Each structure stands twice: as structure tokens, then as C-alpha cells.
Image (cartoon, helix red, strand yellow):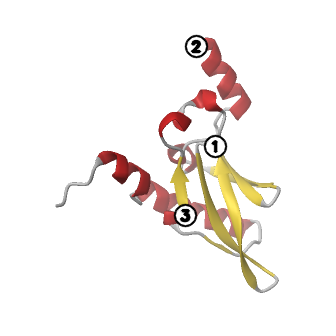
Amino acid sequence: MVYVQTKYRRANHVGGVRKRLAKMIVAALAEEGIEARCEPKDLWPALGYWRQIEQDVYSWEGCCEVKSFGKWMKRSLGSWDRMSSCIKGLTIGGDGFGYEVYANNELEPSKRFNIARKVA
């Protein structure tokens, strides 16, 4: 096996979590009556400095395609929760032009941020 640098592998490697999350997003949108398709390579985590909870940015972002009026249109995805938390159970809500993915049984982002601030 060829050695791949850890930083590169983490950012660009499509593993089981991304594959499962993409399938779950399509299934959740189908439950809402929306025909969608999502590729695992189109989901990417926040890296480096932006992974800290204090930065108040999405933990991961991505895009999917939704069928609207017979045409496939791209929609953005994002979540405050980690990918691994979302694959345990997720809920999708509309957020303007895109969708926001929420992990079930997780704290709200504002509450997570306040807890992190109190500990630090």
C-alpha cells in the first residue's frame, strides 16, 4: 500500500462516514418528498484552525443535487454537528437556498458554544 500523508488523507479521503452520511441525506430528503442525489466526495469537513468549536462555523459543509421542475439543481449543505454525530441520526431543515443538517440528540450550537466557553 502506498503511504499517503495524514493531512491529505483526512481532507480528501472519502471513507465510510462520508459514504453513509451521503446515503442518509438522500433518504432524509426522500422522506420529505424531495428527490435528491448526493456524492460522498461533495461533503468536506472543516480543517485546521476552523475545527475548534469556538470559531462558530459549520463543522462540515457540502452540496447535493435536488430535482426541481425536472432539472437537477445544486443546494448547499452544512451542519454544526460532526459527521460522526450525524450518522447516528439526523434531521434536515431548510436554511435559505440550502439545507442544514442536525444530529439527533445533540446540543444546539449556541448551547455547545456556551459550554465550551465555560470550560475553557
Dot 3 or dot 1: first in sequence order is 3
Which residue does the numbered mark 2 point to in the structure image? 119
Label 3: which secondary element: helix
For the residues bearing labels 1 and 2, Cβ distance under 8 angstroms? no
103 with respect to 33 (left or right): left
Residue pictured at 59% horizontal, 69% vertical: 38
Estimate the spatial distance between the alpha carbons at disc 1 and disc 2, rounded to whole Å: 21 Å
Quadrant in the picture for the N terminus: bottom left
The image's mark for residue 42 is 3
Whether residue 103 is visible to the viewer of this picture, yes or no, is no
Dot 3 or dot 2: first in sequence order is 3
Q: Which of the 4 image quadrants contains residue 34?
A: bottom right
Q: Amino acid at mark 2?
A: Val
Tell me the crowding category of disc 2: few under 14, some 14 to 19, or many 20 or more residues within 10 angstroms, Cα based: few
The image's mark for residue 98 is none
Q: Position of residue 68 (x, y in %)?
A: 79, 78
Q: Nearer the viewer, mark 3 or mark 2?
A: 3
Q: Amino acid at mark 1?
A: Tyr
Which residue does the numbered mark 1 point to in the structure image? 58
Estimate the spatial distance between the alpha carbons at disc 3 and disc 2, rounded to whole Å: 34 Å
Q: Nearer the viewer, mark 1 or mark 2?
A: 1
Residue pictured at 58% horizontal, 61% vertical: 24
74 with respect to 44 (left or right): right
Whether residue 20 is visible to the viewer of this picture, yes or no, is yes
Residue pictured at 83% horizontal, 56% vertical: 96
Q: Position of residue 89 (x, y in %)?
A: 60, 49
